[in-house]
Amino acid sequence: MSGELPSCPNCGFLLEPGATICPSCHLPVPAPTLGAEPSDLPVPAGATAPDPPSSPSPSGTPRPARRPAPRRAASPPPVASPFAAELTRRLNRLSQWEEGAGLLGVELPRLPAWAEEAARTAPDPGPWAEVVRGIERISQQRLSSAFEEWERRTKARLTRLEAYSVDSRLERDQIEETLHAARTGDIPQALTTFQQVDRVVALKERHLDQAREELERVVALLKDMQALGVEPPQDPAEVADDLERELRAGKLAPLKQQIRALRLQAVNRLKSGLPRYITEYGDFLMSERTHGIATELEATELARGAREFFRGHPEEALRRLRALQQRHGLPPSRPARTSSPGRGY
């Protein structure tokens, strides 16, 4: 009603009209606002704001005030089953097997990523555990078969090494240890021993192949010298027999020393005999050219051989000149030498 006295919004004391200071709490009284709703007035400290009035519906009935919808609680993340740790251990072991299987040329089965996730969160891990055990059984069978095939290949390689007096008793014992470990399910030990044997056998083969290659190169060098009429330090056929005996006796260190000495002697002979041969062959090509025979290609190859010689590569020069001689022949004044029955010339 208009005749009612206003009250202090802070302490509720009745005020005189137009009062700006409450005589009870001595706080300023805000000027009244026309049309102000009770909810617009300031709320004292510690007081609770009243609920907003409900707006009337078109029929005049007050509508209930809307309450904020309660928040939905976030769904908890899926809980890993107790089998998750065991599954991770087994899958890691299968991954290690797969790395070694790649060296054997075998492909192992794998559990898909979605199946791994499902197995880790499954409430009943029993079926998934059986799946993983099945994968392990298949992997072990494939690896055992691969180890047996590897045994056959490796023993053939060892037989070749033993033909050159290379001791391989330890590797044969380790092959049996590898197969035993694979058959009993100790796949990590089998893979470790397998890789060790493979490395040692490959190293012995590389040393033998290098010695064989050096032997063949020095014999070819002596034969090329003989074919071009340049006197070699020793007869190539006898040198080949002597070096082959050293190689099959397993004397790789003395063999390499002998090969180095032969090559040094041959290079010294080439340094003295090859320039004369190049000059004579150039005269031979000039003579043929004067008789109308095209020798441009031969002259180019002769120049390349001479260039290699003067660059300090007598073996490469000899190889080119030997190829030229095989295509075009020797000058009439320089017939090729044949092997003599003695050790040298």
Image (cartoon, rainbow, N blue to C red):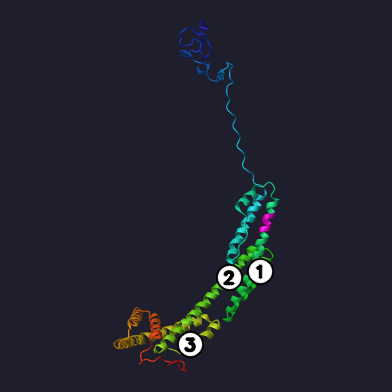
Q: Going from the N terminus, do you reach mark 3 or mark 2 first?
A: 2
Q: Going from the N terminus, do you reach mark 3 or mark 1 first?
A: 1
Q: Going from the N terminus, do you reach mark 2 or mark 1 first?
A: 1
> Which label belongs to residue 198?
2
User: Residue beneath label 1, please?
Assistant: 179
Q: Marks 1 and 2: in contact by CB < 8 Å? A: no
> Which label belongs to residue 239?
3
Can you tell which quarter of the image residue 230 is in? bottom left
C-alpha span from label 3 to label 2: 34 Å
User: Across the whole image, how many numbered discs are drawn on residues?
Assistant: 3
Q: Main secondary structure of the magenta part?
A: helix
Q: Residue at x 63, y 66 (%)?
A: 190
Percent position of residue 248, x then y: 55, 83
The 10 Å Cα crowd at callout 2, few under 14, some 14 to 19, many 20 or more, is: some
Question: Vertically, is 185 above or below 236?
Answer: above
Q: Is residue 52 magenta?
A: no
C-alpha span from label 2 to label 1: 14 Å
Q: Is residue 132 magenta?
A: yes
Q: Amino acid at mark 3?
A: Val
The 10 Å Cα crowd at callout 3, few under 14, some 14 to 19, many 20 or more, is: some
Please provide the residue range marked out in magenta: 130-135
Q: Residue at x 58, y 66 (%)?
A: 103
